[in-house]
Image: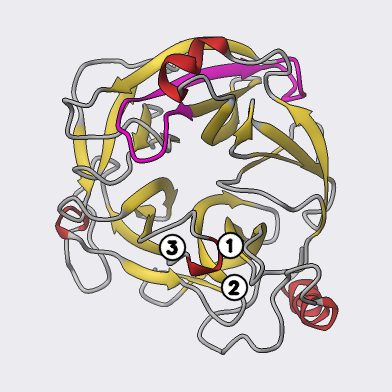
Amino acid sequence: MTPYRLVVTCLLATVLASSVTGQPTAEADAAYPNPGLVTGDINVHDPTVVKRSTGGYLVAHTGDNIPLKTSTDRIAFRNAGVVFPNGAPWTTTYTGGSRNLWAPDISYRNGQYWLYYSASTFGSNRSAIFLATSPSGDSGTWTDRGLVIESRTSDNFNAIDPNLIVDDQGRWWLSFGSFWSGIKLVALNSSTGKRADSTIRSIAGRNGGAIEAPVIVKRGSYYYQYVSFDYCCRGASSTYRVMVGRSTSVTGPYHDRNGTAMTSGGGTEILAGHGSVHGPGHQAVIADSDSDILVYHYYANNGAALLGINLLAYDSAGWPYVH
């Protein structure tokens, strides 16, 4: 999507918005841009997206057995089944028997799709992150590869919200975490996608406060760590917002624009609620042909969780901003 096209579609989104669809309306203030226009099956929570090797886009998101959506143009989305049509019984120890699986992270590497996903119950850190792979990404083609990391009630971290990053040396890392002692990072074996050692590094935290959903990407000289501060899952009362810090090393330390360490609560806000866009967060970042893209969910006035997409750019000091 060209920048001109995004401007046009943002204007169309404002014109077409209504209380029926729950899309953002012209009452939004000027602090942040509205999401670009998306249509079709756009009810999502915790979206992750990958460009498909065959063209178009594949989205996975929180829901029963991990729902999938596809798009050819990053505007029109349609439902495309689920990752595990026959269920995922190996996760029920962590979900209390629920089929609801959380916060997937999808990428395409070494000729296949990799999907890290979470199993837990709300407010508990008895949680686990699993891995599945697929040659095509299509529903029913995924093979579960087993447990990557778990947390127990005696641990000071929470094993949900995974994100895979491959550093400049080709080493694989998994960031994850929600509340408790914050965001963690573990090394992975690039052949198996499983843990390479027992070390758990801390890379962001708010002294037990509301921080989750890490995403790390490398741009230029820096690794940028995006996280969500504050609270999701409260409909139009949600206070989620997207924060960022950066480091010259994937393992940190990460600092915000003011120099505050992310392990000490630092983070520079780049997107927050405005107008009828409530609690934007649980972000993903991908490089596309026209720009870096920020993908996230937000809540409409009626409480529906919807897909948001904006372009990302970088200012003269190398800090990202949404437009």
Quadrant of the frame with the N terminus:
bottom right
Q: Tell me, yes or no, whether the two marked residues, 3 and 1, touch with CB atoms within 8 Å.
A: yes
Mark 1 lies on residue: 298
Badge 2 element: loop
**What range of the chain is rendered magenta?**
118-141
Residue for point 32% across, 34% down: 124
Residue for point 85% across, 77% down: 16
Calculate the distance from the C-alpha at mark 3 to the C-alpha at mark 2. 11 Å
Mark 3 lies on residue: 240
Between 16 and 57, the residue placed more toward the observer is 16
Q: Earlier in the sequence, mark 3 or mark 2?
A: 3
Residue 281 place in picture, x, y as percent: 49, 58
Q: Earlier in the sequence, mark 2 or mark 1?
A: 2
Residue for point 49% across, 68% down: 237
Q: Please tell me in which quadrant of the rendered image residue 129 appears.
A: top left
Q: Is residue 309 visible?
A: yes
Mark 2 lies on residue: 277
Name the amino acid, label 1.
Tyr
Residue 164 lies in magenta, yes or no? no
Q: Is residue 191 visible?
A: no
Q: Tell me, yes or no, whether the two marked residues, 2 and 1, touch with CB atoms within 8 Å.
A: yes
Q: Residues within 10 Å of mark 1 (few under 14, many from 20)?
A: many
Name the amino acid, label 3.
Tyr
Question: Looking at the image, how many numbered discs can be counted on the residues?
Answer: 3
